[in-house]
Amino acid sequence: MGGVFQANAQHQKENTDMKLWYGHPAQRWVEALPVGNGRLGAMIFGNPQDEVIQLNENTFYAGQPYRNDNPDALKRLGDVRDLVFDGKYVAAQKMVDDNFFRGPHGMPYQTIGNLRLTYKDQTEVENYYRELDIENAIVSNHFKKSGINYATKVLSSHPDQVIVAHLTADQSGAISFSASMDRPGEFDFRVIGNDLLEMSGTSTDHEGIEGAVTFVANVKFVPKGGSIRADQNKIEIANADEVTIFISIATNFVNYRDISGDASSRAISYLNKVVSKSFEKVYTDHVADHRLHFDRVKLDLGRTGAADLPTDVRVEQFAQGNDPQLVSLYFQFGRYLLIAASRSGGQPANLQGIWNDQLYPAWDSKYTVNINAEMNYWPAEISNLTELHEPFIQMVKDLSETGQKTAKDMYGARGWVLHHNTDLWRITGPVDFAEAGMWPLGGAWVSQHLFEKYDFSGDQTYLASVYPVAKQAAMFFLDYLVEDPHTGYLVVTPSTSPENVPHQFHNSAVAAGNTMDNQLLFDLFTRTIEAAKILGDQDIVIKEMEEKLARLPPMQTGSWGQLQEWQKDWDNPKDNHRHVSHLYGLYPSNQISPYRTPELFSAAKTSLQARGDESTGWSMGWKVNLWARFLDGNHAYKLIKDQLSPAILPDGKQKGGTYPNLFDSHPPFQIDGNFGCTAGIAEMLMQSHDGAIHILSAIPDEWSKGSVSGLRARGGFEIGIEWDDHHPKEINILSNLGGVCRIRSYYPLEGEGLKEAEGDNPNQFYQLPDIKKPIIKDMDRIQDIELRPIYEYDIKTEPGQNYSIYSKK
Ligand code: FUC
C-alpha cells in the first residue's frame, strides 16, 4: 500500500499538463490508453470491474518469409510504355493490372490478445479517474469501491522488456480477482503452477501464405498478502494487499528471412530476469529510460482554463475554444508515441504504430510507403528523437536487399525497387492494383530518410554505412527512366501520382513523368551525387546519374496557376483528393521556396487551396506541415483544429480527426496523422531546410507568447526560443558540429558575434537545391503572394558551445 497509491490519489490536484485523463473507463478501444516499449504494446481500458489489457508484440504478423514479384511484367513493360506514350492510358493501366500483380498483397499485423482481470467486487465505483502520464510513460487509474480506494498502474518497460501492472488498495487484504487470457484467433492456453498464465499461438495463413510466426505470452502474478491459486483456466487471487503482474511476450521472429527463434524460451527469459525486481525499481528504471528521450524538448504555447478539463472534452471543444495547451500536449503525445513504438534494433512503427486489437486490421496495419510510413518518421529528427529513426533506416536497408530481385525480375533493372507497400517480410513487388500499386518510387522516397538523418547529425561514418543503399536505389531509376518521345525528358513510366486519377480526362492513374516522381528523383540523384563527393566514390555510375539528373522534367505551372501534378495539365480545381503528392517538393522536400522559387511557391499554394482543408487524418497532418512551409501560421493552426476535432460524430459515423485517446483517425485509427501533425507543429516553430534556421516561422495569432527548447535543426544545431507578443525574446543555440549558424527572423536581432548575413550560407548542411528552371506557363495566373520582410544573421559557432541572441532593443 502506501506510496504508490497515495501518489495516485493526488493526481486530480496535480498538474495534468502532460497527461491525458478521463473521468470514466474506456468503453471502446479508441478510448483505451497506449503504453509501449518499442516492441510490446498494450491498450489499457481501466475498467474497475472487468479490466482489459489488450496486448501486442510488433513482429506478430500473418504469413512467413515470401515474395510477391510478377516477372511477367518484364515482357509487357515495353508495350505498357508504348500505350502510355500513345495516350492510351486506360489500356496501359489494364495491361499493368493484368500482368504486374501476383498477390499476395501483404501480411496483416495481428493482435496477441487480452489479459482480463475480473474483480470479485463488481459493485459500482465512485471518484473514478484514469490517465496516461506521457512524461513518465505510465497509465494509471484509481477509484473507490465499497469504501475502499483502489489504484492500478501499467507500463511497458524498455529496459526490462516486459509490461508490468501494479494493483494497490488503501486497505489491506482488499484485492481479489481472477485472471484469464483470450484472443480473436486460435490459441493454446494453460496455467503453470499457481501463479503463471501462458497463452500461445501461431499467426494466420493469409492469401496463400501459411502463417508461421509463433508467440508465447507469459503472465506472472506476484501478490503481497492474501492467497493465489490456479483454478482450471484462470488464476484466482484473494485478499491480497497489492499485486504485481509481469507480462512477457515473444515470438520466433529473428529477421525478415528467419523465423527460427524460440518464442517460449525468449518469453520466459525476459520474465525470469525481471520477476524478482520490485515494481518501484522497474518503474524507476523505466522512467529514467523514457525521460532520456522525452525530456529533450519542452514546449509551452500558453495555458487557459480549458487545460483543466478531461482530454475527451478538450477534443470536443478545441475547434471552438481557446486551448493552446492541447496543442503542446498533442505535440508531446506524438513524441511519446514514437518513443513507445520505435526502438533501435526493432521494427519501425507501422500504420497503427504497434497498437492493434484485430487479426485483419485496415490495410493490414503494415507499411504504406507512398506517404504513411515516411510520415511516421517526420518528427524523428526535428523533435530530437534521432535514435528512434533507426528501425526505419534498418527497414530501408532490408528493402534494398529484397528489392534487388524485384528490380531485376520485373523490370530488368539494376539496383532495387519498392512499390507502394511493404510488410514485416519486406516485400517489394506491387500490391493491390495499378491505381495505387503501379508506383515504383517507394525506394526513392524511403531513401530520403537516409540523408535526412545525416543532415541533422553530420555523422560521416553513418553516411558511409547507408550510402550504398541510396546509390542502389538511384541505380534502379537510371535503368527505369525512359525518354518521353513527345518532350525528350527522361520520365518514370509506368507510374502514378499516388492514388490520384485525372478523372475529367480518363479513368486511369497510369502516366509518365508525374511531378512527384521527378521531385523524388531530383532529390535522390542530387543527394547521392553529393554523398559520392563527400565519401570519394569515383564510380562511373555517378556520371551517368549527373547526366540523367539534367534530363528530368522541370516543375510546371498550369492553366489555373496551379503546380501541375502531372506532366500534362490534368489538374482539376475541384479535386479534393487526400494525397497532395506534387507538394512533396514543398514538404518534406525543399525544392519549393518563397525566396528562391516564388512562382512555384505561389502555384503550390494555389494547388493546396483548391484541395481544401478537411480530409483523412494523415492528409490534414501533411497540410499542417505544408501551411507551415507556406509561412502561414493561422492556416496551419486551422488545420490543427480540423485534425483535433472529434473523429466520432454524434450519429456514430467516423471522419478524419481525433479519437478520445488522441489517436489520429483516418478513419479508422492510423498513427501517421499523429506523427504528421507533431512534425507540423515543430515546423510552425522553426524550419531549417531553406538556407537558414527560420525561427518562429509560422506562429498563429493564438500563440502570441510561448517557449520551446531542444528542437533540432540541420547541421547539428539545437534551438530554444522564447517569445512574447510574437517577438523573439531570447534564442538559444547549442552547436554540436560547429560551423556558421544562419538565423532568419521576422524581427531584428542582436547578440554577441551576430553579424548580418551576406551571400549563401557557407554551412555545408544549408546548401540549396539547384532545381531545373520551372516552366511557368502563364504569369497572369500566378497569384500574388505577400511575404513578411525577414532579417538574416550569421554567427560562427564552435562544437559544444552555446550562444544566446535577443530581439533588438
Ligand atoms: C494510402 C492512403 C489511404 C490510407 C492507406 C493506408 O493508400 O491513400 O488513405 O492511408 O494508405
Image (cartoon, helix red, strand yellow):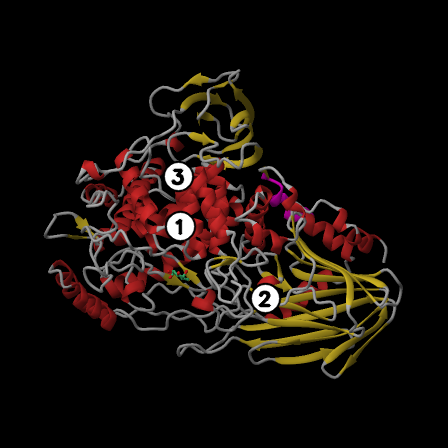
User: In front: 272, or 809?
Assistant: 809
Residue type at tag 3: Arg
Which residue is labeled 2 in the image?
A: 29
How packed is label 3: few (under 14 Cα within 10 Å), some, or many (20 or more)?
many
Marker disc for residue 613: 1
Residue 436 percent coordinates (x, y): 31, 63
Secondary structure, mark 2, is helix
* 232 is higher (above) or lower (below) than 540: below
Secondary structure, mark 3, is helix
* Disc nearer the start of the sequence (1/2): 2
Marker disc for residue 210: none
Query: What segment carries the magenta color?
Result: 288-298
Is 291 colored magenta in this rendering?
A: yes
Q: Is residue 472 visible?
A: no
Pair 1/3: label in front? 1
Secondary structure, mark 1, is loop
Q: Is residue 447 visible?
A: yes
Residue depicted at 24% across the width and 38% down the height: 782
Pair 1/2: label in front? 1
Residue type at tag 1: Asp
User: In front: 766, or 129?
Assistant: 129
Which quarter is ligand 1 in? bottom left
Side of 235 where 588 appears, left or right: left
Q: CA distance from mark 1 to mark 3?
A: 15 Å
Residue depicted at 49% across the width and 42% down the height: 681
User: In front: 120, or 421?
Assistant: 120
